[in-house]
């Protein structure tokens, strides 16, 4: 079966990730690539439950419950949306993926190895990009507090886990402090170079 390419964009709340993910898809399409946008939490039943119960329930639920629900949502997202699109040769660009679980639930104190273990069925992305913005700036960009994650203390810890994955070479860091257009261009350049150069790996588990 023909395989496309799976890319995810990661970052703090307020880093501009959703805008940049959508811009990337638009720009790739303009260049003639068959690209599709998707996001986590997904629009499926478990994703909707997560938004209601974990993110907008007023207070934070146990990190273990969060991690398990996000992993369950991810399994369905991969099976129902990502793999079918990849199998038709599409470039799937996800606004958040497994690194969000490692960063957010890891920052809440869970063992990263355990988070990886419950995400064994999550497909490894071909390319994972981290848009780096200082937590203080990211928080200011949020017009109104939307979820239980959006406080400075949490965002600082989350960034530090993301930076560890950058150091390990699992995430590619893009400077998110520049203008929207400059960040978009940096991401597009990186992705198009990657697409031209890479021999994409086959489908394999996380
Ligand atoms: P967003 O829709 O603005 O990206 O918000 C999703 C929130 O959910 C964000 O605060 C990060 C959090 N999150 C986790 O804690 N773990 C995860 O695995 C994912 C995908 C998101």
Image: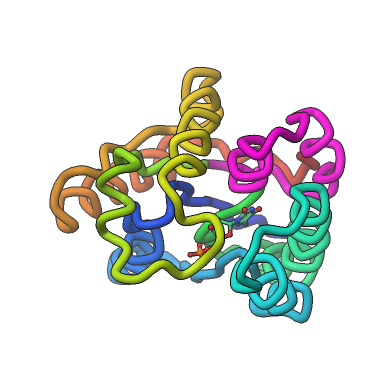
Q: Position of residue 199 (x, y in %)?
A: 56, 36
Using the image, determine if residue 87 lies above or below residue 113. Answer: below
Residue 165 place in picture, x, y as percent: 54, 27
**Which residue is painted at 70% across and 33% down in the image?**
109
Is 28 or 139 nearer to us in this picture?
139
Q: Residue furthest front?
A: 59
The quarter of the picture where residue 124 lies is top right
- Residue range highlighted in magenta: 99-127
Viewer-nearest residue: 63 or 116: 63
Q: Quadrant of ligand 1?
A: bottom right
- Of 204 and 116, nearer the camera is 116
Query: At 86% from the left edge and 44% from the top edge, which residue is drawn?
Result: 118
Q: In this image, 149 relative to 59: left or right?
A: left
Query: Looking at this rendering, what residue extends furthest in the top direction?
Result: 167
Residue at 65% across, 79% down:
43
Query: Is 111 included in the stretch rendered in magenta?
Result: yes
Residue 126, compared with residue 5, is above or below; it is above
Q: Quadrant of the C terminus?
A: top right
User: Quadrant location of residue 46?
Assistant: bottom right
Q: Residue 154: x, y in percent?
A: 51, 43
**Count of numbered circles in the view:** 0
Q: Is residue 175 above or below residue 98?
A: above
């Amino acid at each position: 079966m023909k395989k496309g390419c799976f890319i995810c964009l990661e970052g703090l709340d307020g880093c501009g990730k959703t805008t940049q993910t959508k811009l990337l898809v638009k720009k790739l399409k303009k260049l003639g690539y068959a690209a599709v946008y998707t996001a986590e939490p997904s629009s499926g039943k478990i994703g909707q439950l997560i938004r209601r119960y974990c993110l907008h329930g007023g207070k934070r639920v146990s990190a273990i419950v969060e991690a398990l629900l996000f992993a369950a949502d991810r399994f369905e997202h991969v099976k129902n949306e990502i793999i079918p699109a990849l199998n038709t040769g599409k470039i799937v660009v996800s606004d958040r993926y497994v690194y969000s679980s490692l960063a957010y639930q890891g920052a809440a104190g869970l063992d990263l190895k355990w988070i990886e273990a419950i995400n064994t069925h999550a497909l490894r992305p071909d390319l994972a990009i981290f848009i780096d913005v200082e937590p203080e700036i990211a928080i200011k960009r949020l017009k109104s507090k939307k979820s239980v994650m959006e406080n400075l203390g949490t965002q600082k810890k989350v960034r530090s886990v993301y930076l560890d994955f950058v150091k390990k070479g699992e995430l590619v860091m893009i400077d998110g402090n520049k203008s929207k257009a400059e960040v978009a261009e940096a991401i597009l350049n990186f992705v198009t170079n990657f697409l031209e150069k890479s021999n994409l790996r086959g489908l394999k588990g996380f």
